[in-house]
Amino acid sequence: MELRHLQHFVAVAEEQHFTRAAERLMVSQSGLSASVRALERELCAPLFVRTTRQVTLTEAGRALLREAERILAQVRTAREAVAAVQGVLRGTVTLGTEQCIAGVYAAGLLASFRRRHPDVEIRLRQSGSLDLAEEVAGGRLDLAFAYRPCADSDQLRSIPLATEPMTLLCHPDHPLATVGKPLAPADLAAEVFVDFHPDWGPRRATDAAFAVAGVRRKVALEVNDVHSLLDLVDENLGVAAVPRHFRRKREALRALPVKGVPETVYETVALLPPPQATSPAARALMALLEGS
């Protein structure tokens, strides 16, 4: 099995189109098709379902994609490791992050990294913590900053960054604003909540905390960014249970502690592959973070 065959296969899987994949790889479409057919013959399985408009993965193709991405990521890491030994840090670092992560200021960190390592290309994407964990484990991200989405595994490890308690945000005119004491989950059972989509770290942590308390809550308004969440609470359309540092983003809102849940309900971490699969650029980025 040749690396170029895997590279061609991954490009077609990502583009879902042979012509676009050929243009991206700067190869002929006939050569790309021949490369994929050679891989299919070697594996004795079709990898794509081809139509006139789109190309989709078969079950065998989906299984191969996960491993192909991991293999190509390891090859890139090996090449960059050799360059690093020679005193040159180059290549690409691909970082994922959820919004407003406690314990790291991503923009400042990346700016410092660029000044120190100008030959490394920086790529950044935002997503929910569960998706970020899957991307790191699959070799599609070098590292990510997230709320802890799962336990460590053979393909994923975590480095703690910060922990925070749960805080309830509400409008100053909301009845809870004048309570003046910590609230238990049971006190909030009748409230309408604003929250993130289920794959976001704060949503998963809050859902888990309320489940442990045996309280069902109503999440009527789901958003995918912090400022939309704060806007909805600011319009008194619901309350939000969030990490404590969110309160600094909208000081006009009332912030109340929530009792009866773990003190460290929100734990933020850096997610990385196993040490042997961690790229030199990712190690340099983490060293910069840990030294700041």
Image (cartoon, rainbow, N blue to C red):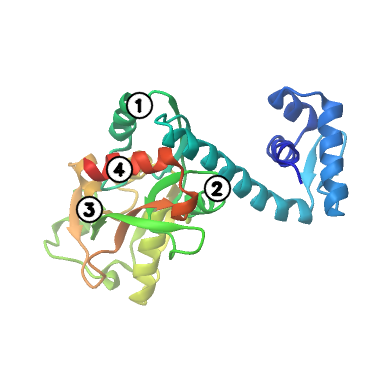
Who comes first in sequence, dot 3 or dot 4?
A: 3
Mark 1 touching mark 2, by CB under 8 A? Answer: no
Q: Residue at x 32, y 32 (%)?
A: 107
Q: Of the numbered discs in the image, which one, if any, rests on residue 114?
A: 1
Q: Is residue 184 above or below residue 102?
A: below
Query: Closer to the N terminus: mark 1 or mark 3?
Result: 1
Q: Which residue is mark 2?
A: 139
- State which mark lies toward you, 1 or 3: 1
Q: Amino acid at mark 4?
A: Ala
Mark 4 or 2, closer to the camera: 4
Position of 276 relative to 36 (above/below) = below
| Quarter containing the C terminus | top left
Res. 244 mark: 3
Mark 1 in CB contact with mark 3 (< 8 angstroms): no
Q: Nearer the viewer, mark 3 or mark 4?
A: 4
Q: Nearer the viewer, residue 139 or 228?
A: 139
Left/right placement of residue 162 relative to residue 110 reads: left
Label 1 or label 2, whichever comes before in sequence order: 1
